[in-house]
Image: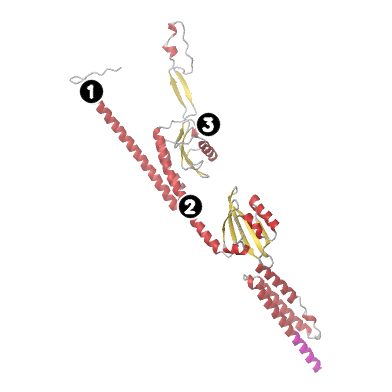
Amino acid sequence: MPVITTPPGGSLYGTRAVCELLAETIATRIAALESFIQGDAELTVRRLEQRMISAIFRDGDWRSAFCDSPKTLLQPLKATGTALLFRHDVVSVGEVPGTAELREVGAWLDQQPCRPVLATASLGIDEPAFAALRSVASGILAVPVSSSPGEYLIWLRPERVRTITWGGDPSKAVVIGDDPSHLSPRRSFAQWHQLVEGTSEPWTRADLAMARLIGETVSIVLLQFRSVRLLIAQDQLDRVRQKVGASELPVAIADAGGRILLTNDAFRQLLQVGSLPVLCLRDLSGCFADLDDARWRLEDLLTDRRSWRAEVRLKAREGEARPVLVTADPVFSSPDRLLGFVVQFTDLRERKAAEDARLRFQSGVLGENRLRSPGVGCESSPLYRKLLYAVFGNAQLAALEITHSADIARIPESLESVRLSVSRTAELLERLLQHASSAAGKDG
């Protein structure tokens, strides 16, 4: 036990008081330094938060602010690399393993007991599957940034190979001999050196506190980012609803399970589904005239995700079945992620009416042969034959222009007008031909 001597002219109490004063002074200084370090760290974190939030409103994302100042994330924890696992993305700074390895680390973290901060200085020893990562990730410090699995902010430290000197081999069994001379400090306490591999610089309590502070800040920013995205998505959804609702094209939008999310008035009027419970795409099969084929096509769309494009007939309450063109497609955000389905219908009644009008025009006008009318003089028939060919040629050009018109509803009426005009012209020319032939006969 150390002996405290009283200085000349002093007392033991005075010495103890001086020591206590010195200890208090040192403790106060240490507390001030720790407070300064904590305040500086909090200021750094707040600046990171401000940059990330500004990036969200400026660029619509936070990644640029997260990566633009590596020291802000690495230096406070003396880490060589950091990675943020968020949704399906991995954003990293500094020296880190590959993306696939980081995702595996995230899956391993999901299996650990739920804690606000998880730290280890021997990842490859705790989990041998990560032994190959020790050059960059022997030590990891992780904090969750959301309640979703696999979303973490991770700091990494590389392996630190070091030698520990022991006052003897701690694993060596103690041997006690009969002769007390066998006990020798040089033999019993000979230095023993151990090479320690697979571990990093250990994480301190201050490191854990700083990681938790940064993690909470990043969690707040990411939650705000998701909130902004939700508001944007909601605004876009409202716009889509308005546009779909105002569209004259019948359309239905369904989720990945086939549940119908949105339809418009044109869709409901075309399919006459007011009294039918159409809650999913499979329910639409009852609206088609060919029930079995429609059921098979819809099942193929929902199960095998194959597009459906065909001319079909819809049931009608009165009259014949209504011809429509159905276009149904699956919608993907990525090759392996289905968002839902879009089903559109095009009413073909006007097109069918236009097609029938074209057929009537062909058979009723171009099929006529008024050049074989009796009583036409051979000497004058070539002239009138030429005139009639010109009339039929003009009629064909007019019909071609009409059939390419954007206003399909007026095609039958326009073609019928041309047909009647050609018929009247042909009759007029025929009468003129007969009159000319009759006048020529009298003159002769």
The reply to whether the magenta stretch includes residue 439 is: yes
Q: Are marks 3 and 1 in contact (CB under 8 Å)?
A: no
Label 1 or label 2, whichever lies nearer to me, is 2
Mark 1 vs mark 2, CA separation in Å: 68 Å
Observer able to see residue 61: no
Q: Is residue 435 above or below residue 308?
A: below
Mark 3 vs mark 2, CA separation in Å: 38 Å
In the picture, the quarter occupied by the N terminus is top left
Q: Residues within 10 Å of mark 2 (few under 14, many from 20)?
A: few
Q: In this rendering, would 301 be left or right of 73?
A: right
Callout 1: SS = helix
Q: Is residue 66 above or below residue 171?
A: below
Residue range of the region highlighted in magenta in the rendering: 430-444
Label 3 or label 2, whichever lies nearer to me, is 2
Say which mark, if any, is on residue 15: 1
The residue under label 3 is 127
Say which mark, if any, is on residue 230: 2
Q: Which three-letter amino acid code belongs to the residue tagged 2?
A: Leu
Residue most extreme to the top: 179
For residue 395, which quarter of the picture?
bottom right
Choose the circle earlier in sequence order: 1 or 2: 1
The reply to whether the magenta stretch includes residue 73 is: no
Please give the count of numbered marks on the rendered protein. Answer: 3
Residue 206 spot, x, y in % from top left: 39, 34
